[in-house]
Amino acid sequence: MNPVSELVADVAVLTDSLPSQHQGIFSYRVPDHLQAAIAIGQLVWVPLRQQQVQGVVLAMQRRTVSGLRDLIDLVDPDLSIPQLTIQLAHWVAENCYTTLAAVLDLCLPPGMIRQAVTTWRATAAGLTCELGALPERERAILFYLRRHGELSEADLRAALRGSDANLRAAYRSLAERGLITRRLRIDPPRVRPQQEQFVRLTLPDLDQAIAELRRAPRQAAALRWLAERTTSDPPTVNELRRATGIDSTGIRALERRGFVQLVGREIYRDPLATVHPATDTPPPLTSAQRVAYETIVTALEAGTGGRFLLYGITGSGKTEVYLRLIARALRLGRQALVLAPEIALTTQLVRRFVARFGHQLAVLHSGLSDGERYDEWRRLRRGEARVAIGARSALFAPLPDLGLVIVDEEHEPGYKSDAAPRYHARDAALHLADLAGVTVVLGSATPSVETYYAARNGQIQLLELPERIGAQIGVDGLVHSRPLPLPPVRIVDMRHELQQGNTSIFSIKLQHALAQTLARGQQAILFLNRRGAASFVFCRDCGYVARCERCAAPLTVHYDTATTAEAGESVRVLICHSCGQRTATPVVCPQCLSHRIRASGIGTQRVAEVVRELFPDARVARWDRDSISGKNAHDALLEAMVRHEIDVLVGTQMIAKGLDLPLVGLVGVVLADTGLHLPDFRSGERAFQLLTQVAGRAGRRSEGAQVIIQTYQPDHYALQAACEHDYRAFFREEIAFRRALAYPPFGRLVRFVTTAATESICRRQAEQLAVTLQTYITGRDLVGWRLIGPAPAFFRRQRDRWRWHVLLRVPPATDIREIRLALDAVGPLYGWVIDIDPVHVL
Ligand code: ADP
Ligand code: ZN
Ligand code: ZN
């Protein structure tokens, strides 16, 4: 027989049962009956060894082949990943050092991917044979199968507590003698389209029908109600029942008589059904907005993949620019994707998008049910929804006509996934410009150092909105804009407070400002950076902070008994979490010889107590991860704040972002220093961003608001710059520091983290990897490659395990392929977390 040309599909199988280095791509013959229906991106069933697994079709071509197994079936014709998303998945897999399957997993709605389950049951012979004659394990298997009918291998394993290998031998032996038989069971997906029954009137003559229904007044009333409806859409069964009181028997009787017809139709679960659109009249753009808009639109129309940074202070009208751009993309027949930090999606932002785009909008975030996600996914895939707004993972939303991507608050570290695959949604979004000519717009009031640096070098085009908009309704009833000055920010030097005998955690200035704000009937926000609180050692008199001599990283307190961070007594040594160097805790300040040098640390609870002591009548609430959990609690607190049922809100990081609260007249930062001294090269950047964001919560509607920052380090450049609202001053200092130490963007980092039950094992693992890496670097004479560490991670213990890390620094332009080569060579790295271009090193 001559070899024939066959249609062959390359399929990435979605199973975790392959060895981790295996890319998991196999070829299958497409049987004739599937050839018309199959397409690239489709989710399909394929055979894999004894199993049946799901996979995604990556490519198809006619080839002369023999010996290929047949592709089994499509899973669901609707479930197909757009080509662009597959290309993106390839890129993410390569850049995150992970398998394609792991990324494709993120490209499908949750709950869709299934594995076939192997089950066993007894045959007729097996049901009647003599159990006593069998070896023990086989006897037990058959005993269970007789008793329960069919059981999966997982069930049998649990019941018999056997290992897979032993059991497999027993199954084989039983099956060979015809006592048991095997089957693949495929459970239905957890999520399915939701069907709704609609009632349609069919009768030709209403009067005659009503006459016929003399004895059934309920049915007659229902018919009349149907006939009198003015809308042409048929009502659902439930609507009919609610409106007329008819029950399901009555409806079935009407159907039997031929008066109505029941039609099943799919309805979408709509997560936005309960979201009230914001009141919205698109205002005329300011001149700065217009310049930004028109520049980006030019790229959008050309479709050649422009990249922009919209740098505009808080309240400068960035969102309005996004909304206009999206509207334009829609008119061009394209879809748009908006990425926003998770927290922003629970607040006012979504309402503004609903107001503008209504049913064209799909929303994707972790608060949705699987059913809602599935429906939003399909509405986008079918092109019925044209705008997707979501958190990080919405990057993988199926948008076949994607033309515009907006990454709001692009500096947010939350865009980087903290679980594998460790992708950075902003960086991946930027890559879409290369892949498909998508226009990518990054927006921020405090751009990340890397992004701003790229903008200065011309890789990203910089557009600015320099003024805060104070929207006003004019006498003509239209919205007018007028620049609103940013609130003044004052730094309070806590060293002086101590010298003046004030030992409270609130300075005299902050106490006065609080009193004033409360007297005016306004609200105050008190902010505490709790990340890494109580961790570094500083001098209360001169502000000196203990730092590593080699790395300049702040040294952190290492306690004998971990956790108890506030007990100044148990301090043993100071550790550098960058290079691992240990030094003794100083008893006197090396700078001013004061004895008041100790660890930092206060919590929101303590701050709230002090407010209550000073202002017994004030209504105080706390907002942090400990006191508030769940989306509803957030919303409730936010609502209470808006209704002015709270006077003073004490909170951590969470309150910094996105809140638009008109009555806030004072923002106080209780201790700015904590964030400044985390042993992370990005701590200055984070502190600047956070302080700027926090300050941005004040005076959003009117003038006269103030911001007070308390610190022991008033000269720190990040504080100074935040105080002056001066991003450029911050950037100048920061970029010089990064350059001096070859940190990003002047170097790329790869972070390796390992954990173990004891510190000595953990340390040994880290040391071994460091040796292997160093040998690789030396052996190949890799210029500019350097190891930092090994060292204990800043969060030294998590979930009862010790953590150590090693950092690899390579030159900035190092290709991902070179990094992968190194990882392959020193691997396999089982159990290691490998983070390429980490956003933090804590
Ligand atoms: P950002 O996203 O930069 O924080 P927004 O787009 O939310 O800024 O704008 C801040 C406020 O100003 C909003 O209340 C918005 O409705 C209003 N606004 C935006 N653009 C204009 C404009 N051109 N004219 C009047 N008001 C505007
Ligand atoms: Zn000192
Ligand atoms: Zn060091």
Image: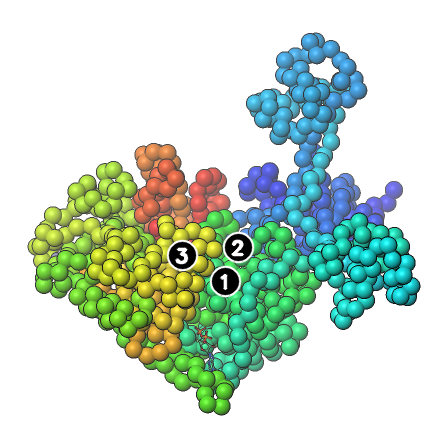
* Mark 3 lies on residue: 839
Q: Please determine whether, in this image, residue 756 is positioned above or below residue 423.
A: above
Q: Label 1 sits on what residue type?
A: Leu
Q: Within the image, what quadrant is residue 798 found in?
A: top left
Evaluate if marks 2 and 1 touch, with contact meaning CB atoms under 8 Å apart.
yes
Q: Secondary structure at mark 3?
A: loop
Label 2 beta carbon within 8 A of ligand 1: no
Q: Nearer the viewer, residue 355 or 439?
A: 355
Q: Which residue is mark 2?
A: 367
Badge 3 amino acid: Val
Residue at the outermost left position: 593
Please provide percent x and percent y for residue 235: 75, 62
The vertical placement of 622 against 483, above or below, is above
Identify the image's colour scheme: rainbow, by chain, secondary structure or one colour: rainbow
Q: Residues within 10 Å of mark 1 (few under 14, many from 20)?
A: many
Tell me the distance, in whole angstroms, between the alpha carbons under discs 2 and 1: 9 Å
74, above or below 433, in the image? above
Residue 513: x and y in percent read: 23, 69
